[in-house]
Amino acid sequence: MNDWQKNKIRITYIMPSAAAGGAERFLLDLISNLDLEKFVPSLILFDHGGFFLKDFAALGMPVVVLQKKYKFDLGNFCKLRQALKKLKPDIVHTQLGGDVYGRLVARCLGVKKIISTEQNVQVHEDWLANKLKTWTAKFANKIVAISEAVKADSLKRYQLPPEKLIVIPNGVDVQKFFVKPRALTSPGKIILGSVGRLTEQKNFSFLIKALASFKDKNFECLIAGEGELRKDLQTQINSLELGQKIKLVGLQKDIPVFLQQLDVFILPSLWEGLGIVALEAGLTGLPVLAARVDGLKEIIKDEATGWLFDPQDEKDLAAKLSYVFDFNNREILKDRGRKLQVAVLERFDIKNIVRQYEKLYFNL
């Protein structure tokens, strides 16, 4: 250990990969904004690298990438133990699939302080994963829920004592995303967009079906992301003859630039822990239409900072889209975007969120 590190708190973050997801991007922003006069971060990816790997490596900290071969891989567990033993952290901070492996290894090595962050409501968690997380949760000193919705889900799902949980929302890098809200000044083409994994949770099939009713409108909808439903969604788009209006544009490395080309952001998720892309769109000044689900309801106030719709009611979304397509409502759209931007700035600035995490680390 270098002399300059001796009086600093060493934190090792553990998660499966650096895949292109909101939780992974948040961790990148969290580490990027840590006070390096007080903390020495490191990262273990026990499954594989991924989309943000180069970004994590560019921070100049140790990044260990393991290759998990099986769902329950004893060899991977041993490699994780060796990596953590070498890093000698004061605190282990796990999230996503890193909770079970990370908490067990940290416990085995006698790490005194363990933190986990719950990033979502675990709608499809299987029985075994639930039992393992419930068992290993007792090794954690604190579990951070990113929203009140996630806190309620975690309390019930893992039988946790309330004092073990604390709510700290995910945050957004203001410098990357802040743009002065702009009005749609002409009745020309309106650019709609969304960002998310092409999975059941994000509910893009529902959005595509709702947009099919507006073929006569001058719009384009750009959906950024990848996932197992890409082929199915493209087939749906083609069958509805919407290939010229709805485009699956793949992963976007520069999300701020992608958002800045949009006029309206739509997030039709069936569930969300919070919805970091809604925060990013709001900070960009975009008017946001979002599903009326826990998590998103903690960001968007219906008819005040955006619009909420039932993610299983096409008529509800169609009514909101009709409002968006009406040129007479353009100034109201701008006003909603401005109000959401103010709300995001007040509650979700990454620098303020990082200070909350740093306080938690110090309190341990």
Image (cartoon, rainbow, N blue to C red):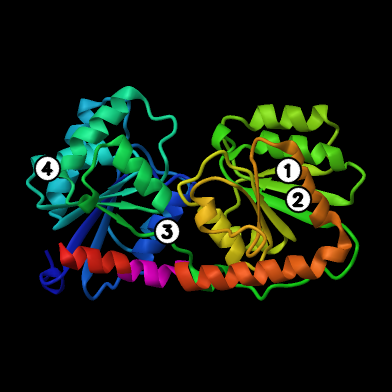
The earlier-in-sequence mark between 4 and 2 is 4
The earlier-in-sequence mark between 3 and 2 is 3
Q: Nearer the viewer, residue 60 or 234?
A: 234
Residue type for callout 4: Arg
Q: Position of residue 320 (x, y in %)?
A: 75, 50
Kindly identify which numbered label has been placed on residue 320: 2
The earlier-in-sequence mark between 1 and 3 is 3
Q: Position of residue 210 (x, y in %)?
A: 77, 38
The correct choice, above or below, for 363 with respect to 209 in the image is below
Which residues are the magenta region? 348-355
Check contact, mark 1 vs mark 2: CB within 8 A.
Answer: yes
Check contact, mark 1 vs mark 4: CB within 8 A.
Answer: no
Query: Which residue is identified by label 4?
Result: 107
**Magenta span includes 353:** yes
Residue type for callout 2: Lys
Query: Which residue is identified by label 3?
Result: 170
Quarter the C terminus occupies = bottom left
Left or right, 200 with respect to 60, comes to right
